[in-house]
Amino acid sequence: MSSKRFRTMDELALACGVSRPTLSKYFDDPESVRAATRRKIEAALEGSEYRPNLFARNLNRKQTRHIGVIVPHITDPFYAALVRKVELRCLDTGFWPIVISSHGSPTLEARAVDTLLSLKVAGALVAPLGAETDIKMLASLQDDIPLVFFDSRIDGQGPFVGTDNRQSIALLVEYLCRTGEHPTYFEMPPVNRNASERREAYIAIMEQRGLEPIVVGQAQDTSWEFEEIGFIEMQRILDARSLPTRTILCANDRIAFGVMSAAFSRGLKVGRDEDCDLRVAGHDDHPLSRYTCPPLTTVAQDIDAIAIRSTDILFASLRDGTDQSPGEPTVRTTLVGQLVMRQSA
Protein backbone atom coordinates (compact mmCIF):
# COMPACT_ATOMS: atom_id res chain seq x y z
CA MET A 1 0.00 0.00 0.00
CA SER A 2 2.93 2.35 0.68
CA SER A 3 4.01 2.35 -2.98
CA LYS A 4 0.56 3.28 -4.34
CA ARG A 5 0.00 6.70 -5.85
CA PHE A 6 -3.02 8.61 -4.59
CA ARG A 7 -4.38 11.32 -6.84
CA THR A 8 -7.03 12.62 -4.45
CA MET A 9 -7.80 12.69 -0.77
CA ASP A 10 -10.78 10.42 -1.43
CA GLU A 11 -8.47 7.72 -2.84
CA LEU A 12 -6.16 8.03 0.16
CA ALA A 13 -9.08 7.85 2.61
CA LEU A 14 -10.36 4.69 0.90
CA ALA A 15 -6.90 3.08 1.09
CA CYS A 16 -6.57 3.99 4.77
CA GLY A 17 -10.02 2.76 5.67
CA VAL A 18 -10.95 6.11 7.22
CA SER A 19 -13.47 8.77 6.32
CA ARG A 20 -12.45 11.83 4.34
CA PRO A 21 -13.30 14.21 7.26
CA THR A 22 -11.04 12.14 9.53
CA LEU A 23 -8.24 12.36 7.00
CA SER A 24 -8.73 16.10 6.68
CA LYS A 25 -8.62 16.38 10.45
CA TYR A 26 -5.33 14.47 10.46
CA PHE A 27 -3.72 16.90 8.01
CA ASP A 28 -4.85 19.83 10.18
CA ASP A 29 -3.40 18.27 13.33
CA PRO A 30 -2.11 14.65 13.44
CA GLU A 31 -2.52 14.58 17.23
CA SER A 32 -6.25 15.25 16.87
CA VAL A 33 -7.02 11.71 15.63
CA ARG A 34 -6.68 8.44 17.55
CA ALA A 35 -3.27 6.79 17.59
CA ALA A 36 -4.51 3.70 15.72
CA THR A 37 -6.08 5.86 13.01
CA ARG A 38 -2.94 7.96 12.78
CA ARG A 39 -0.81 4.84 12.27
CA LYS A 40 -3.04 3.66 9.39
CA ILE A 41 -2.83 7.03 7.66
CA GLU A 42 0.92 7.31 8.10
CA ALA A 43 1.42 3.76 6.81
CA ALA A 44 -0.49 4.70 3.65
CA LEU A 45 1.49 7.91 3.25
CA GLU A 46 4.86 6.26 3.73
CA GLY A 47 6.63 6.00 0.39
CA SER A 48 3.81 7.73 -1.47
CA GLU A 49 4.13 11.16 -3.05
CA TYR A 50 0.74 12.40 -1.96
CA ARG A 51 0.55 15.94 -0.60
CA PRO A 52 -2.74 17.63 0.23
CA ASN A 53 -3.62 20.73 -1.75
CA LEU A 54 -3.76 23.15 1.16
CA PHE A 55 -5.01 26.10 -0.89
CA ALA A 56 -7.87 24.06 -2.36
CA ARG A 57 -8.82 22.78 1.09
CA ASN A 58 -8.71 26.28 2.51
CA LEU A 59 -11.04 27.60 -0.16
CA ASN A 60 -13.64 25.11 1.02
CA ARG A 61 -13.38 26.18 4.63
CA LYS A 62 -15.35 28.85 6.40
CA GLN A 63 -12.09 30.03 7.96
CA THR A 64 -8.70 29.20 6.48
CA ARG A 65 -5.45 28.73 8.36
CA HIS A 66 -3.71 31.49 6.41
CA ILE A 67 -2.82 34.97 7.66
CA GLY A 68 -2.08 37.71 5.13
CA VAL A 69 0.79 40.12 5.80
CA ILE A 70 1.36 43.22 3.63
CA VAL A 71 4.43 45.43 4.07
CA PRO A 72 5.84 48.27 1.93
CA HIS A 73 9.25 46.67 1.31
CA ILE A 74 10.21 43.17 2.43
CA THR A 75 13.83 43.91 1.41
CA ASP A 76 14.06 46.68 4.02
CA PRO A 77 15.84 45.04 7.01
CA PHE A 78 13.46 46.77 9.43
CA TYR A 79 10.40 45.20 7.80
CA ALA A 80 12.25 41.94 7.25
CA ALA A 81 12.96 41.69 10.99
CA LEU A 82 9.37 42.58 11.83
CA VAL A 83 7.92 40.08 9.35
CA ARG A 84 10.18 37.35 10.71
CA LYS A 85 8.72 37.84 14.19
CA VAL A 86 5.17 37.88 12.81
CA GLU A 87 5.78 34.72 10.77
CA LEU A 88 7.06 32.81 13.80
CA ARG A 89 4.09 33.97 15.89
CA CYS A 90 1.69 32.79 13.19
CA LEU A 91 3.37 29.41 12.85
CA ASP A 92 3.40 28.88 16.62
CA THR A 93 -0.36 29.49 16.63
CA GLY A 94 -1.07 27.05 13.80
CA PHE A 95 -1.45 29.62 11.02
CA TRP A 96 0.56 29.92 7.82
CA PRO A 97 1.56 33.49 6.88
CA ILE A 98 1.31 34.74 3.29
CA VAL A 99 3.66 37.73 3.01
CA ILE A 100 3.31 40.23 0.15
CA SER A 101 5.37 43.37 -0.49
CA SER A 102 3.66 46.37 -2.03
CA HIS A 103 7.08 47.72 -3.11
CA GLY A 104 5.96 51.22 -2.14
CA SER A 105 3.36 51.19 -4.93
CA PRO A 106 -0.33 51.92 -4.21
CA THR A 107 -1.25 49.88 -7.28
CA LEU A 108 0.64 46.83 -5.98
CA GLU A 109 -0.75 47.40 -2.50
CA ALA A 110 -4.30 47.27 -3.90
CA ARG A 111 -3.40 44.15 -5.85
CA ALA A 112 -2.02 42.56 -2.67
CA VAL A 113 -5.30 43.25 -0.89
CA ASP A 114 -7.21 41.72 -3.80
CA THR A 115 -4.94 38.65 -3.65
CA LEU A 116 -5.64 38.15 0.05
CA LEU A 117 -9.37 38.40 -0.63
CA SER A 118 -9.15 35.75 -3.36
CA LEU A 119 -7.14 33.44 -1.09
CA LYS A 120 -9.76 33.78 1.66
CA VAL A 121 -7.18 34.40 4.39
CA ALA A 122 -8.49 34.20 7.95
CA GLY A 123 -7.12 37.62 8.87
CA ALA A 124 -4.52 40.17 7.86
CA LEU A 125 -1.75 42.33 9.26
CA VAL A 126 -1.04 45.41 7.14
CA ALA A 127 1.68 48.08 7.24
CA PRO A 128 -0.04 50.55 4.88
CA LEU A 129 1.57 53.07 2.55
CA GLY A 130 -0.69 55.74 3.97
CA ALA A 131 -1.49 58.78 1.83
CA GLU A 132 -1.61 56.76 -1.41
CA THR A 133 -3.38 53.70 0.01
CA ASP A 134 -6.67 52.72 -1.64
CA ILE A 135 -8.91 53.14 1.42
CA LYS A 136 -11.93 51.57 -0.29
CA MET A 137 -9.95 48.46 -1.17
CA LEU A 138 -8.75 48.11 2.43
CA ALA A 139 -12.31 48.60 3.65
CA SER A 140 -13.47 45.73 1.44
CA LEU A 141 -10.84 43.51 3.05
CA GLN A 142 -11.88 44.64 6.52
CA ASP A 143 -15.52 43.89 5.73
CA ASP A 144 -14.57 40.23 5.15
CA ILE A 145 -11.90 39.48 7.76
CA PRO A 146 -10.29 40.88 10.93
CA LEU A 147 -7.52 43.31 10.04
CA VAL A 148 -4.82 44.90 12.20
CA PHE A 149 -2.52 47.72 11.10
CA PHE A 150 1.04 47.73 12.34
CA ASP A 151 3.99 50.17 12.14
CA SER A 152 1.86 52.77 10.32
CA ARG A 153 -1.84 53.51 10.63
CA ILE A 154 -4.81 54.97 8.79
CA ASP A 155 -7.23 56.98 10.88
CA GLY A 156 -10.43 55.20 11.80
CA GLN A 157 -9.70 52.10 9.75
CA GLY A 158 -9.06 49.50 12.44
CA PRO A 159 -6.84 48.38 15.32
CA PHE A 160 -3.25 49.61 15.21
CA VAL A 161 0.02 48.66 16.91
CA GLY A 162 3.12 50.81 16.51
CA THR A 163 5.58 53.20 18.10
CA ASP A 164 4.52 56.37 19.89
CA ASN A 165 6.20 58.86 17.55
CA ARG A 166 5.59 61.79 19.91
CA GLN A 167 7.45 60.01 22.73
CA SER A 168 10.29 58.73 20.55
CA ILE A 169 10.97 62.06 18.83
CA ALA A 170 10.85 63.81 22.22
CA LEU A 171 13.60 61.48 23.46
CA LEU A 172 15.83 62.46 20.55
CA VAL A 173 15.15 66.21 20.69
CA GLU A 174 15.72 66.39 24.43
CA TYR A 175 18.93 64.34 24.21
CA LEU A 176 20.36 66.39 21.34
CA CYS A 177 19.51 69.70 23.02
CA ARG A 178 21.02 68.51 26.29
CA THR A 179 24.29 67.42 24.70
CA GLY A 180 24.87 70.17 22.14
CA GLU A 181 23.33 72.46 19.57
CA HIS A 182 19.59 72.08 18.98
CA PRO A 183 18.66 69.91 15.99
CA THR A 184 17.53 70.70 12.48
CA TYR A 185 14.93 68.15 11.38
CA PHE A 186 15.58 66.28 8.12
CA GLU A 187 12.19 64.97 7.09
CA MET A 188 11.31 61.83 5.16
CA PRO A 189 9.00 61.72 2.12
CA PRO A 190 5.29 61.56 3.09
CA VAL A 191 4.99 57.85 2.30
CA ASN A 192 3.01 56.93 5.42
CA ARG A 193 1.55 58.32 8.63
CA ASN A 194 4.87 58.06 10.46
CA ALA A 195 6.30 60.83 8.26
CA SER A 196 3.72 63.44 9.32
CA GLU A 197 3.57 62.29 12.94
CA ARG A 198 7.33 62.57 13.45
CA ARG A 199 7.52 65.96 11.75
CA GLU A 200 4.63 67.31 13.82
CA ALA A 201 6.15 65.90 17.02
CA TYR A 202 9.49 67.61 16.32
CA ILE A 203 7.81 70.98 15.71
CA ALA A 204 5.67 70.73 18.84
CA ILE A 205 8.56 69.72 21.10
CA MET A 206 10.86 72.44 19.77
CA GLU A 207 8.16 75.07 20.33
CA GLN A 208 7.62 73.79 23.87
CA ARG A 209 11.31 74.37 24.53
CA GLY A 210 11.10 77.90 23.13
CA LEU A 211 13.21 76.98 20.09
CA GLU A 212 12.48 77.65 16.44
CA PRO A 213 11.68 74.44 14.53
CA ILE A 214 13.86 74.08 11.44
CA VAL A 215 12.75 71.51 8.84
CA VAL A 216 14.75 70.56 5.75
CA GLY A 217 14.58 67.70 3.28
CA GLN A 218 12.41 66.55 0.42
CA ALA A 219 8.71 66.58 1.34
CA GLN A 220 7.32 66.25 -2.19
CA ASP A 221 8.94 63.00 -3.27
CA THR A 222 6.97 59.84 -2.43
CA SER A 223 9.80 57.45 -3.20
CA TRP A 224 10.97 54.86 -0.66
CA GLU A 225 14.59 55.30 -1.77
CA PHE A 226 15.36 57.07 1.50
CA GLU A 227 19.15 56.73 1.39
CA GLU A 228 19.32 58.31 -2.07
CA ILE A 229 16.95 61.11 -1.06
CA GLY A 230 18.99 61.86 2.07
CA PHE A 231 22.25 61.79 0.13
CA ILE A 232 21.16 64.05 -2.74
CA GLU A 233 19.31 66.58 -0.59
CA MET A 234 22.13 66.79 1.95
CA GLN A 235 24.68 67.35 -0.80
CA ARG A 236 22.53 70.18 -2.15
CA ILE A 237 22.25 71.77 1.31
CA LEU A 238 25.99 71.51 1.92
CA ASP A 239 26.88 72.90 -1.51
CA ALA A 240 24.53 75.84 -0.90
CA ARG A 241 26.04 76.34 2.58
CA SER A 242 22.49 76.52 3.91
CA LEU A 243 22.60 74.03 6.79
CA PRO A 244 20.93 75.89 9.69
CA THR A 245 22.59 73.98 12.57
CA ARG A 246 25.34 71.41 12.92
CA THR A 247 23.01 68.88 14.55
CA ILE A 248 20.64 66.93 12.32
CA LEU A 249 17.74 64.78 13.49
CA CYS A 250 16.63 62.52 10.63
CA ALA A 251 13.08 61.17 10.40
CA ASN A 252 14.42 57.63 9.99
CA ASP A 253 17.75 55.81 9.98
CA ARG A 254 17.78 55.26 6.23
CA ILE A 255 17.58 59.04 5.64
CA ALA A 256 20.44 59.36 8.14
CA PHE A 257 22.54 56.86 6.16
CA GLY A 258 22.27 59.12 3.10
CA VAL A 259 22.96 62.27 5.12
CA MET A 260 26.11 60.76 6.66
CA SER A 261 27.33 59.56 3.27
CA ALA A 262 26.84 63.03 1.79
CA ALA A 263 28.77 64.57 4.69
CA PHE A 264 31.62 62.13 4.10
CA SER A 265 31.66 62.94 0.39
CA ARG A 266 32.23 66.61 1.30
CA GLY A 267 35.04 65.81 3.74
CA LEU A 268 32.99 66.45 6.90
CA LYS A 269 33.39 64.42 10.07
CA VAL A 270 30.25 63.15 11.79
CA GLY A 271 30.30 62.42 15.52
CA ARG A 272 29.98 63.83 19.01
CA ASP A 273 33.66 64.58 19.62
CA GLU A 274 34.87 68.19 19.69
CA ASP A 275 36.69 67.88 16.37
CA CYS A 276 33.54 66.74 14.51
CA ASP A 277 31.70 68.95 12.03
CA LEU A 278 28.20 67.45 12.37
CA ARG A 279 26.07 65.42 14.73
CA VAL A 280 23.51 63.11 13.10
CA ALA A 281 20.74 61.05 14.73
CA GLY A 282 18.05 58.82 13.24
CA HIS A 283 14.95 56.90 14.22
CA ASP A 284 14.03 53.17 14.16
CA ASP A 285 17.30 51.42 15.14
CA HIS A 286 17.55 49.91 11.69
CA PRO A 287 19.56 46.65 11.87
CA LEU A 288 22.43 48.34 10.00
CA SER A 289 22.54 51.49 12.15
CA ARG A 290 25.09 50.04 14.56
CA TYR A 291 27.45 49.36 11.65
CA THR A 292 27.57 52.82 10.08
CA CYS A 293 30.72 54.89 10.49
CA PRO A 294 30.36 56.21 13.08
CA PRO A 295 27.56 54.07 14.60
CA LEU A 296 24.24 55.92 14.48
CA THR A 297 22.49 57.39 17.51
CA THR A 298 18.80 56.57 17.16
CA VAL A 299 15.59 55.44 18.86
CA ALA A 300 14.87 51.72 18.85
CA GLN A 301 11.37 50.57 18.01
CA ASP A 302 10.29 47.50 19.97
CA ILE A 303 9.95 45.08 17.05
CA ASP A 304 9.19 42.12 19.30
CA ALA A 305 6.35 43.95 21.03
CA ILE A 306 4.89 45.23 17.75
CA ALA A 307 4.79 41.69 16.36
CA ILE A 308 3.40 40.16 19.55
CA ARG A 309 0.71 42.78 20.20
CA SER A 310 -0.52 42.96 16.62
CA THR A 311 -0.76 39.18 16.20
CA ASP A 312 -2.38 38.82 19.64
CA ILE A 313 -5.10 41.31 18.68
CA LEU A 314 -5.68 39.51 15.39
CA PHE A 315 -5.79 36.03 16.93
CA ALA A 316 -8.16 37.24 19.65
CA SER A 317 -10.55 38.46 16.93
CA LEU A 318 -10.30 35.11 15.13
CA ARG A 319 -10.77 33.14 18.31
CA ASP A 320 -13.75 35.15 19.53
CA GLY A 321 -15.26 35.63 16.10
CA THR A 322 -15.38 39.37 16.69
CA ASP A 323 -14.09 42.40 14.86
CA GLN A 324 -14.20 46.12 15.46
CA SER A 325 -17.58 47.38 14.32
CA PRO A 326 -18.25 50.72 12.61
CA GLY A 327 -18.69 53.47 15.19
CA GLU A 328 -16.56 51.77 17.84
CA PRO A 329 -13.43 53.63 19.03
CA THR A 330 -10.36 52.50 17.10
CA VAL A 331 -8.06 50.42 19.30
CA ARG A 332 -4.60 51.99 19.20
CA THR A 333 -1.65 50.38 20.94
CA THR A 334 1.37 52.69 20.97
CA LEU A 335 4.70 51.47 22.32
CA VAL A 336 7.53 53.55 23.73
CA GLY A 337 10.86 53.82 21.94
CA GLN A 338 14.25 53.40 23.58
CA LEU A 339 17.06 55.93 23.08
CA VAL A 340 20.21 54.26 21.72
CA MET A 341 23.26 56.49 22.16
CA ARG A 342 26.10 55.83 19.75
CA GLN A 343 29.00 57.85 18.34
CA SER A 344 27.21 59.83 15.61
CA ALA A 345 25.59 62.28 18.08
Image (cartoon, helix red, strand yellow):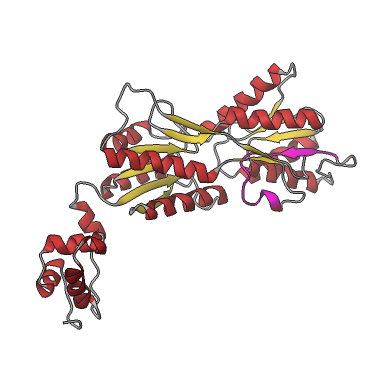
Is residue 279 inside the magenta stretch? yes
Image height of 252 relative to 92, above or below: above
Can residue 244 be seen in this snapshot?
no
Q: Give the image location of residue 249, x and y in percent.
A: 71, 34
Quarter occupied by the N terminus: bottom left
- In the shown orientation, is residue 332 left or right of residue 204? left
Task: Locate the C terminus and report the quarter of the image it occupies.
Answer: top right
Predominant secondary structure, magenta span = loop
Foreground residue among 221 and 340: 340
Q: Estimate the x, y position of residue 51 in percent, counting from the top left.
A: 25, 69
The residue stretch that appears in magenta = 277-290
Q: Looking at this rendering, what residue extends furthest in the front direction?
A: 35
Residue 217 relative to residue 145: left or right? right
Q: Which residue: 21% across, 69% down?
A: 35
Q: Where is residue 138 in the image (x, y as percent from the top left)?
A: 35, 35
**87 with respect to 303 (left or right):** left
Residue at figure coordinates x 64%, y 20% from the top left: 204
Q: Can residue 102 be seen in this view?
A: yes
Residue 39 higher or lower than 179, as above or below: below
Residue that extends furthest to the right in the rendered view of this protein: 275
Residue 215 x, y percent position in the rendering: 69, 27
Would residue 242 be counted in the magenta stretch? no
